[in-house]
Image (spheres, grey):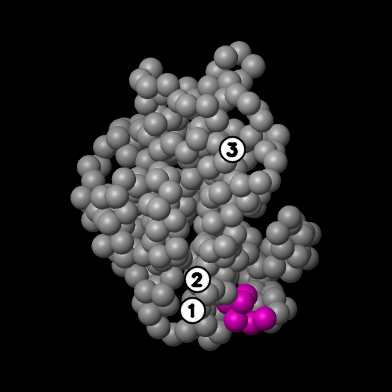
């Protein structure tokens, strides 16, 4: 096994996690790993890789301490309570470093992220068809004033994915980013209030970690980074709007007591453009991660666009033979 690419270039694996589910509460209805599955993956990772910190990759790229064989970084997006309550004790017990990326509006303002509102709405409805019907009604109204028709939306977005049937993909894509902002906002909030809860702050308190949790984790050696103010897709925003979203994200660093320089950033939905990279460089961001699936090449020109492997591609159990990615 080696962590060298064909030309002697150093490689590392970065794993992307989202929900690690508790046994009760609203978070238990979200898709993700349960505690036993995460524990099994951690056993596999420690058997076949060498866990390192996210900033260790930057140090190696900048000519500092070289990486050990088969380096791997664990990253956790969105700042769920399970990251503190389930993941953190296991990492601390095994001496495994990791990076966590809470969203400012969920951790600090107690707002539920749109992606979670959509997931909870689908879980509460039990069947995507009523949610599809509500979306289609609004599309039909918009079409009367010149907007795209229901048939146009379905032709492009009614497709099954690796994870979801076509109706669920349709709901997620349209409510996450396809529909106009004003229409998405109205639909998401209305469906969430009717089907899930009219107390958004109570739901947020159930779903997300607190500032005290993040401080505790940072003091124990975990990396706390930024992941957006409202978890918006940056490439859909103007440069000025991106600056507002990024600067709002850095409120997490302020709350935890970290400086606004040499920080780690995680792009919401893996989405960024050249404006984004320029804004992060101007703010002295040291390392940033995407959702592009690949091994990470450790070089200074790659540090703001590092790819990650999805948790679903990691086996569980220390006795499982290493996958091709591990051998590579």
The rendered magenta stretch, by its main secondary structure, is classed as: helix
Q: Is 327 in front, or is 272? A: 327
The quarter of the image holding the C terminus is: top right
Q: Are circles 1 and 3 on residues that touch, CB within 8 Å?
A: no
User: Residue 149 in magenta?
Assistant: no
Q: Which mark is first along the chain, 2 or 3?
A: 2
Q: CA distance from mark 1 to mark 3?
A: 34 Å
* Residue 49 vertical placement versus 30 (above, below): above
Residue found at x 70% / y 34%? 324
Secondary structure under tag 1 reads: loop
Q: Position of residue 111 (x, y in %)?
A: 38, 70
Please, which residue is most extreme toward the front here? 319
User: In the rendered view, does 79 fall on the left or right side of 24?
Assistant: left
Q: Are circles 3 and 2 on residues that touch, CB within 8 Å?
A: no
Please, which residue is most extreme toward the top here? 7
* Residue 110 vertical placement versus 178 (above, below): below
At label 2, counting other C-alpha atoms closer than 10 Å, the crowd grade (few under 14, some 14-19, many 20 or more) is many
The stretch in magenta equals 121-126
Task: Quickly name the residue at label 3.
Answer: 48
């Amino acid at each position: 096994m080696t962590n060298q690419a064909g030309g002697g270039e150093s490689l590392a694996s970065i794993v992307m996690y989202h929900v690690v589910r508790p046994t009760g509460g609203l978070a238990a209805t979200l898709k993700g790993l349960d505690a036993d599955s995460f524990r099994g993956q951690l056993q596999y990772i420690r058997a076949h890789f060498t866990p390192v910190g996210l900033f260790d990759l930057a140090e190696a790229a900048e000519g500092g301490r070289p990486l050990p064989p088969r380096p791997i970084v664990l990253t956790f997006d969105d700042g769920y309570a399970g990251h503190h309550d389930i993941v953190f004790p296991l990492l601390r017990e095994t001496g495994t470093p990791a990076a966590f990326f809470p969203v400012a509006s969920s951790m600090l303002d107690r707002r539920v992220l749109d992606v979670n509102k959509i997931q909870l709405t689908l879980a509460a409805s039990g069947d995507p068809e009523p949610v599809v019907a509500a979306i289609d009604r609004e599309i039909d109204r918009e079409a009367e004033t010149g907007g795209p028709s229901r048939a146009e939306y379905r032709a492009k977005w009614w497709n099954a994915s690796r994870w979801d049937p076509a109706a669920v993909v349709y709901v997620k894509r349209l409510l996450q980013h396809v529909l106009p902002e004003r229409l998405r906002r109205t639909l998401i909030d209305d469906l969430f209030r009717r089907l899930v809860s009219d107390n958004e702050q109570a739901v947020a308190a159930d779903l997300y970690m607190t500032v005290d949790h993040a401080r505790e984790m940072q003091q124990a050696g975990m990396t706390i980074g930024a992941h957006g103010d409202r978890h918006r897709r940056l490439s859909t925003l103007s440069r000025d709007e991106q600056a507002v979203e990024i600067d709002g994200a850095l409120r997490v660093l302020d709350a935890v007591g970290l400086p606004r320089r040499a920080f780690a950033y995680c792009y919401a939905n893996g989405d960024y453009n050249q404006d984004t990279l320029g804004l992060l460089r101007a703010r002295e961001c040291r390392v940033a991660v995407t959702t592009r699936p690949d091994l990470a090449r450790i070089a200074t020109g790659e540090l703001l666009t590092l790819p990650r492997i999805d948790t679903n591609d990691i086996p569980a159990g220390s006795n499982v033979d290493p996958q091709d990615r591990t051998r590579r």
